[in-house]
Image (cartoon, helix red, strand yellow):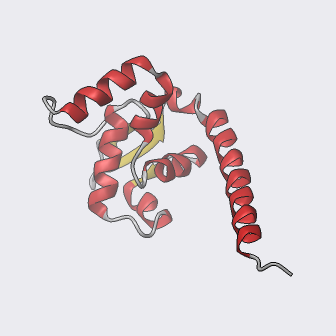
Amino acid sequence: MAKRKETSTNHMNREYINDECGIAYAIDIMAGRWKLKILYKLEKKTMRFRELKERIPNITDRMLTLHLQELEADGLISRTVYAEVPPRVEYQLTESALLLIPVWDQMNEWGHQHREKQRQSVDLAVKPAS
C-alpha cells in the first residue's frame, strides 16, 4: 500500500477496517487508478516496463513506476532483473495474485452487468412520458 502518515486518524481508521475486513484489505491494496489495469495486463503474460506503458497508453512513467513498486511491495507482482547490458527487468503476477484471477473475472462480469442495469434505469427515468 502507499505510504501514509501513520499518526493520522484516516490511517488508523483504514488500518482498523483492513484488520477487521479482508475484503476491505484486498480492495485497498488493489485500489489506485491504474493498478487493476496493470494486473489485468500482467495476467496475460510477463512484461517489461515499456511494454506495459505501450499497452496502457494514458499512464505516465511516474504513475506506472509508483504502482509497480506498490504492487511489488504488496506481493501481487514480482520484478525480475536480468544481469544483461542493457539491464532487462520483467514484471509478472505472483502466485498470490494468480489466485485472484477468478475473483477478478467475477467482479468484471458483475461490473458489466451492473453498469448496464444502471444505464437502463437511467434511460427509463429520463424518457418522457408518452
Q: Is residue 124 left or right of residue 45?
A: right
Using the rendered image of the protein, determine whether residue 77 is visible from the camera's viewpoint.
no
Q: Position of residue 96 (x, y in %)?
A: 50, 26
Residue at the image position 34 percent from the left and 48 percent from the top? 67
| Position above or below: 110 against 94 | below
Residue placed most toward the observer, 92 or 56: 56
Q: Is residue 87 left or right of residue 36?
A: left
Residue placed most toward the observer, 3 or 44: 3
| Position above or below: 100 against 129 | above
Residue at the image position 20 percent from the left and 31 percent from the top? 9
Residue at the image position 67 percent from the left and 34 percent from the top? 102
Q: Position of residue 109 (x, y in %)?
A: 71, 47
Residue that extends furthest to the front in the rendered view of this protein? 129
Q: Quadrant of the N terminus?
A: top left
Quarter of the image for residue 112 reads bottom right
Q: Is residue 74 left or right of residue 85?
A: right
Using the rendered image of the protein, determine whether residue 5 is visible from the camera's viewpoint.
yes
| Position above or below: 17 against 92 | above
Quarter of the image for residue 64 reads bottom left
Residue placed most toward the observer, 71 or 111: 111
Q: Position of residue 36 (x, y in %)?
A: 49, 48
Quarter of the image for residue 17 reads top left
Residue at the image position 73 percent from the left and 59 percent from the top? 116
Q: Position of residue 25 (x, y in %)?
A: 42, 28
